[in-house]
Image (cartoon, coloured by chain):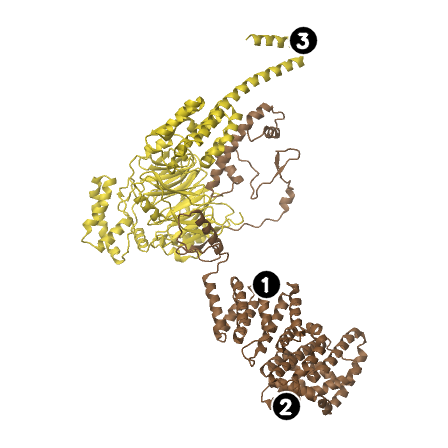
């Protein structure tokens, strides 16, 4: 304090005498001294972190082979927390150098996180960026075997690197397991977002999940009718199987009523079923569940057309590959954002960045062969003919109403309605018969990335930049459910075949499964390394496929919530995925101008036999890669007869 | 510290009207600017992904700004990538090269063409898992390559696709069948109507181009193997001709492979199994083929014709070569046109005739076969020289030789009347019916008017089909030329009147002295040719000139 007084006195004296230059020189000197002091202090802190981390790192890299991968797993959280500590204490420059020195180690596993964290340049950013905030607030859980844990503690005590100890204590929860270290192949969890998400996921994934198919579906009735006509005597036996399965998953007391229901309908369908006898089973043996939503009734003529399609379905497997009909959009001038194909391929819709939606009726363009697939559609098509004829010679019907780029379009199951979602925060419902807008659904606060009709129609789900997914019914302008929980944009949404669940893929690199009835998250799937772009659920409701920005495709088992087989399916974004009607094939379409067909059955069989083993080693087998002529594949859809429709915009030149 | 240097902040501050931003503020702002930039870009990438694109555009940036409730940056909407330029004198300062556009210019400019409206087209990407080879699908090579690569990558998943290891060029199944069928036709059934259809198909069908290398190899191979089988050789040459005439095939790169086989057919020592085989015809065919190639591709390959003529003249002038080879060489050269004949054959004609003459005479050449061959060669020489002469004369139709060559013309005249007589005699004796020559005999002027149109082929075909006839004709020509000169008195009278007409013309055509000279050359040519061939040469003179002489 004395020093300061003296300084002040000197300054006052100098000022009084008018010795400006001297005064300035003195001030300069002072400031330099003080900054030096702070500089050296910062140097100290940074050095300590730097030294501590590099010592931990070299130790971990030199540790015993069998424990190395476990110890290396510790490095990443320590690394990012060291960095964030430095930032939080205000040593930007040092944090930067620290970050860049060791960044390379983690690039392979965590490149996208690193790119985000790199942008943190001031303590306030730590608060703002959700990834940083999230990882600051939550502890990472790392599983170590007893011995690795011991090694780590020993090292820290021996080297007295208390900074590291601090970081580790503050941000990492060790789950010490007795016995052998876990195998490297189990690493998928370690790859994901740091934070308590694994904990959460584990907890969530304990929940009960009724992944079975809806009871009393058309397919089931058809199947029943066929087996009835085959052997009526052993019906009792046949009936026993699904019941047993049901008991596993659903309450037994619901069964009585549904069975009697089924029998009534069976008799009605039986007559048609007897005439054409299909050789193999249409639906795999999946447990049946009851719908928790009130489902709309199928009009009888639609039911007939479905039955017709089921009878004429081509059986697909690894040896019998599907035919692929490709719809190419020409002259889109980079404006096509999304496309949709109706179940029979007769209608094709495109959503454009100029806010318009265009619907092409392929029957009118001169492909009558495909349109005749469906008898149920004839009525609607005629309606469109008469209406569209007044319009100018445009070969499509133009639907205008949005005020921002349209990011998704989706046909209702019987192609009489079309949903479109846009960056103007709204979802619009259009009638394909009237070519007019029916409803505008407002509710999201940010662009709506995706909208999907449920498999039975009437309900639809949307995904938005506001980090929520919502479930709506056509007749209400307010959402029925809001699913909140994702840490970043919800990018895509898909319905479970039994309509009781929806799955959402997000920019936080996770996929969640939500119970529609309760609106709660029922599963959390961690394993993607980048934004999830596409989802598909197998027709038997047990497996899910998800594709991401890097071209990875992961198969998940919904009941356990574990990944079955991650593969680098494509070189670029996987825009779309689709399961064939029996669930034997998976088709994927990508920005690398490829449609690829994957064998699901063989890999799943392998899974079932290997279930005792822990490692999910089986992989999807590539059956066929079909390159297109510089046309990224935006959309894929199997018709009910197992014809594969694909759509994409020709990107000539680029 | 931040990737945005503080200078940038200062420049931006200046541009928005803050002249002297303190460096501390700039330093403090720089990291935040970087963070905001990253944030906006992150959002822009999301917009890009949802627009199903892999290239970030200015629209995406605007959408991202909209998401953050910030006014978008106007004026950057553009289809082209923006071009930034480095500011002179600053290392890290860039600016957008934004040209000033005159408003008037924009208004006056014609409206740009309206962009095409969006359309949807369908095609089969695959039929039961197999990609059909249609224009909408990428070419087959492209299909094979990536799968190969994939196979390398996923060593574990064995693809059930049967792949042959790297083939650069894949023929479709249909083309392979086509090729096999054509090959079979050539080798086994070259006389059938089906083969004619095949030739037509080869000459017309598009899409045969992938087969050209295979065909050229096949032809070269089969020619060398089947030199003794005339019908196959003929079929091969016909296939070649069809390929050459196909407008959809770009055959030039394969010419070098095809030429040797054609030339082989032209100047081979022995073609055909037996001596009696009509190998002359295939030589003639090959000669025409070679000539047509030279005409079509001569301008592309400058040395094509020179190399060809070199080969042929070599064969022609080598006395050790067989007469059949000489014949081929002469045919080849003469097919290349009269100027080639004039430049290459005529100068050597005299010496060659000395060589040839003894071969033709009954007394000196006892081997009848050899003699016949010699006569053939003689005939071809005659034809070559004659067509050359014909060409010369045709160039100057209104001009005639100076009077001093009158005797030659009389001679010519006599020879002409003499020739039909001989022919008639020959044809009657040898019992080979030849309408054109017969007609010539009956009505010389009428026959002559017809003659030019048929001269080349007619003579060659007649000589081809009936060597004996020609032979006798030629030999009798030689033997009895003197006698012919003295016989017909009737012609002498005609000659006198012809001379009168001629004299009138001479007085009127002084302006064309140069042409006269040319014509004189032609006259000299005629005289020298006559000395070698006798009156046989006169059949090549056009009727117009004939009239003058008559």
Location of residue A230 in the rendering, given as x and y in whole percent from the top left corner? 22, 55
Check the image and report above or below for A126 versus B209.
Answer: above
Residue drawn at 46 percent across, 39 percent down:
A423
Residue B319, quarter of picture: bottom right
Q: Quadrant of the N terminus of chain B?
A: top right
Between B176 and B258, the residue placed more toward the observer is B258
Asked if the residue under mark 3 is in contact with the one under mark 1, i.e. CB atoms within 8 Å, the reply is no
Location of residue A217 in the rendering, given as x and y in whole percent from the top left corner? 28, 47
Asked if the residue under mark 3 is in contact with the one under mark 2, i.e. CB atoms within 8 Å, the reply is no
Left or right: A579 in relation to B210? left
Measure how far apart labels 1 and 3 are at the Cα level.
Answer: 100 Å
Chain of the residue displaying label 2: B
Chain of the residue displaying label 1: B
Q: Are marks 2 and 3 on the same chain?
A: no
**In this figure, which residue is indicated by the disc labeled 2?**
B425
Between A573 and A619, the residue placed more toward the observer is A619
Check the image and report above or below for B168 versus B372.
Answer: above
Question: In this structure image, what is the colour of chain A?
Answer: yellow
Q: Quadrant of the C terminus of chain B?
A: bottom right
Measure how far apart labels 2 and 3 are at the Cα level.
Answer: 148 Å
Chain corresponding to brown in the figure: B
Location of residue B304 in the rendering, given as x and y in whole percent from the top left corner? 64, 65
Residue B439, quarter of picture: bottom right
Between B211 and B345, the residue placed more toward the observer is B345
């Amino acid at each position: 304090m004395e020093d300061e007084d003296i300084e002040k006195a000197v300054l006052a004296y100098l000022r009084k005498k008018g010795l400006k230059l001297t005064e300035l020189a003195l001030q300069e000197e002072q400031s330099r001294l003080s900054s030096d002091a702070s500089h050296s202090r910062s140097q100290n802190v940074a050095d300590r972190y730097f030294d501590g981390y590099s010592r931990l790192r070299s130790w971990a890299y030199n540790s015993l082979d069998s424990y190395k991968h476990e110890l290396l797993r510790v490095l990443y959280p320590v690394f990012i927390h060291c960095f964030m500590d430095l930032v939080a204490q205000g040593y930007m420059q040092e944090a930067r150098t620290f970050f860049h020195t060791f960044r390379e180690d983690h690039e392979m596993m965590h490149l996208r996180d690193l790119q985000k964290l790199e942008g943190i340049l001031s303590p306030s950013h730590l608060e703002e960026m959700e990834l940083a905030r999230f990882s600051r607030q939550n502890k990472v859980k790392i599983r170590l075997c007893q011995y690795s844990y011991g090694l780590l503690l020993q090292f820290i005590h021996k080297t007295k690197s208390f900074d590291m100890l601090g970081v580790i204590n503050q941000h990492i929860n060790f789950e010490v397991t007795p016995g052998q270290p876990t195998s490297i192949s189990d690493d998928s969890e370690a790859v994901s977002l740091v934070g308590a998400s694994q904990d959460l996921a584990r907890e969530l994934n304990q929940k009960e999940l009724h992944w079975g198919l809806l009871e009393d579906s058309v397919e089931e009735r058809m199947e029943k009718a066929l087996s009835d006509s085959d052997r009526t005597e052993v019906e009792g036996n046949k009936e026993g199987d699904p019941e047993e399965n049901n008991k596993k998953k659903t309450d037994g007391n619901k069964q009585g009523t549904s069975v009697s229901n089924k029998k009534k309908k069976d008799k009605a369908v039986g007559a048609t079923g007897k005439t054409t006898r299909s050789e193999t089973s249409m639906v795999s043996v999946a447990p049946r569940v009851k719908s928790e939503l009130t489902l709309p009734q199928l009009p009888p003529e639609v039911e007939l057309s479905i039955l017709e399609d089921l009878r004429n379905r081509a059986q697909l497997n690894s040896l019998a590959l599907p035919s692929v009909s490709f719809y190419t959009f020409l002259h889109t001038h980079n404006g096509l954002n999304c496309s949709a194909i109706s179940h029979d391929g007769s209608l094709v819709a495109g959503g454009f960045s100029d806010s318009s939606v265009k619907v092409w009726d392929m029957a009118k363009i001169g492909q009558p062969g495909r349109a005749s697939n469906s008898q149920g559609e004839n009525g609607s098509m005629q309606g469109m003919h008469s209406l569209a004829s007044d319009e100018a010679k445009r070969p499509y019907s133009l639907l205008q109403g949005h005020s921002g780029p349209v990011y998704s379009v989706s046909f209702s199951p019987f192609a009489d309605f079309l949903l479109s979602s846009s960056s103007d925060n709204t979802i619009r419902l259009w009638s394909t018969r009237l070519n007019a807008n029916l409803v505008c659904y407002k509710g999201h606060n940010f662009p709506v990335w995706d909208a999907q009709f449920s498999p039975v129609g009437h309900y639809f789900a949307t995904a938005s930049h506001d980090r929520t997914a919502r479930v709506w019914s056509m007749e209400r302008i307010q959402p029925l459910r809001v699913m909140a929980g994702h840490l970043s944009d919800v990018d895509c949404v898909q319905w479970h075949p039994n309509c009781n669940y929806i799955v959402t893929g997000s920019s936080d690199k996770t996929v969640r499964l939500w119970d529609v009835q309760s609106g709660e998250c029922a599963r959390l799937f961690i394993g993607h390394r980048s934004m999830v772009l596409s989802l598909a659920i197998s027709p038997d409701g047990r497996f899910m496929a998800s594709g991401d920005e890097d071209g990875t495709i992961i198969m998940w088992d919904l009941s356990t919530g574990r990944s079955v087989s991650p593969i680098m399916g494509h070189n670029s974004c996987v825009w779309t995925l689709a399961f064939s009607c029996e669930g034997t094939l998976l088709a994927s379409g990508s920005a690398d101008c490829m449609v690829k067909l994957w064998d699901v059955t063989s890999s799943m069989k392998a899974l079932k036999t290997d279930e005792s083993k822990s490692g999910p080693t089986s992989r999807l087998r590539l059956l066929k890669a079909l390159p297109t002529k510089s046309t990224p594949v935006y959309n894929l859809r199997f018709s009910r007869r197992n014809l594969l429709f694909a759509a994409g915009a020709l990107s000539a030149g680029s | 510290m931040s990737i945005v240097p503080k200078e940038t902040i200062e420049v931006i501050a200046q541009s928005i009207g803050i002249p002297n931003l303190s460096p501390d503020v700039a330093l403090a702002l720089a990291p935040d600017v970087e963070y905001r930039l990253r944030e906006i870009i992150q959002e822009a990438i999301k917009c890009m992904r949802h627009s199903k694109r892999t290239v970030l555009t200015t629209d995406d940036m605007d959408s991202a700004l909209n998401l953050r409730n910030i006014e978008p940056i106007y004026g950057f909407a553009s289809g082209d990538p923006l071009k930034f330029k480095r500011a002179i004198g600053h290392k890290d300062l860039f600016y957008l090269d934004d040209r000033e556009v005159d408003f008037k210019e924009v208004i006056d400019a014609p409206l740009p063409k309206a962009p095409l409206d969006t359309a949807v087209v369908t095609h089969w990407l695959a039929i039961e898992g197999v990609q059909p080879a249609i224009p909408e699908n990428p070419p087959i090579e492209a299909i094979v390559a990536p799968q190969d690569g994939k196979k390398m990558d996923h060593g574990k998943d064995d693809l059930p696709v049967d792949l042959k290891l790297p083939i650069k060029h894949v023929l479709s199944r249909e083309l392979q069948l086509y090729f096999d069928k054509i090959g079979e036709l050539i080798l086994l059934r070259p006389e059938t109507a089906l083969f004619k259809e095949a030739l037509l198909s080869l000459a017309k069908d598009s899409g045969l181009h992938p087969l050209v290398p295979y065909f050229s190899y096949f032809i070269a191979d089969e020619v060398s193997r089947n030199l003794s089988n005339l019908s196959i050789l003929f079929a091969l040459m016909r296939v070649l001709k069809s390929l050459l005439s196909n407008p959809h095939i770009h055959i030039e790169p394969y010419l070098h492979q095809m030429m040797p086989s054609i030339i082989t057919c032209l100047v081979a020592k022995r073609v055909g199994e037996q001596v009696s085989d009509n190998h002359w015809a295939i030589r003639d065919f090959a000669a025409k083929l070679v000539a047509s190639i030279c005409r079509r591709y001569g301008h592309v390959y400058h040395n094509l014709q020179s190399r060809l003529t070199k080969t042929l003249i070599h064969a022609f002038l080598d006395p050790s070569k067989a007469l059949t080879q000489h014949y081929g060489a002469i045919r080849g050269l003469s097919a290349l046109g009269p100027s080639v004949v004039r430049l290459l054959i005529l100068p050597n004609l005299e010496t060659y005739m000395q060589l040839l003459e003894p071969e033709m005479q009954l007394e000196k050449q006892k081997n009848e076969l050899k003699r016949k061959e010699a006569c053939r060669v003689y005939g071809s020489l005659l034809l070559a020289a004659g067509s050359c002469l014909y060409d010369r004369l045709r160039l100057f139709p209104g001009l005639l030789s100076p009077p001093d060559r009158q005797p030659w013309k009389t001679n010519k005249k006599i020879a002409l009347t003499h020739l039909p007589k001989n022919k008639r005699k020959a044809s009657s004796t040898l019992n080979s019916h030849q309408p054109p020559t017969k007609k010539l005999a009956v009505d010389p002027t009428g026959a002559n008017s017809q003659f030019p149109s048929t001269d080349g082929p007619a003579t060659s075909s007649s000589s081809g089909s009936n060597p004996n006839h020609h032979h006798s004709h030629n030999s009798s020509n030689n033997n009895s030329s003197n006698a012919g000169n003295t016989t017909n008195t009737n012609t002498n009278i005609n000659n006198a009147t012809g001379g009168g007409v001629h004299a009138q013309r001479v007085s009127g055509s002084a302006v064309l002295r140069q042409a006269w000279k040319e014509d004189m050359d032609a006259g000299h040519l005629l005289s020298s040719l006559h000395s070698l061939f006798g009156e046989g040469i006169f059949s090549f003179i056009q009727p117009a000139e004939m009239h003058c002489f008559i």
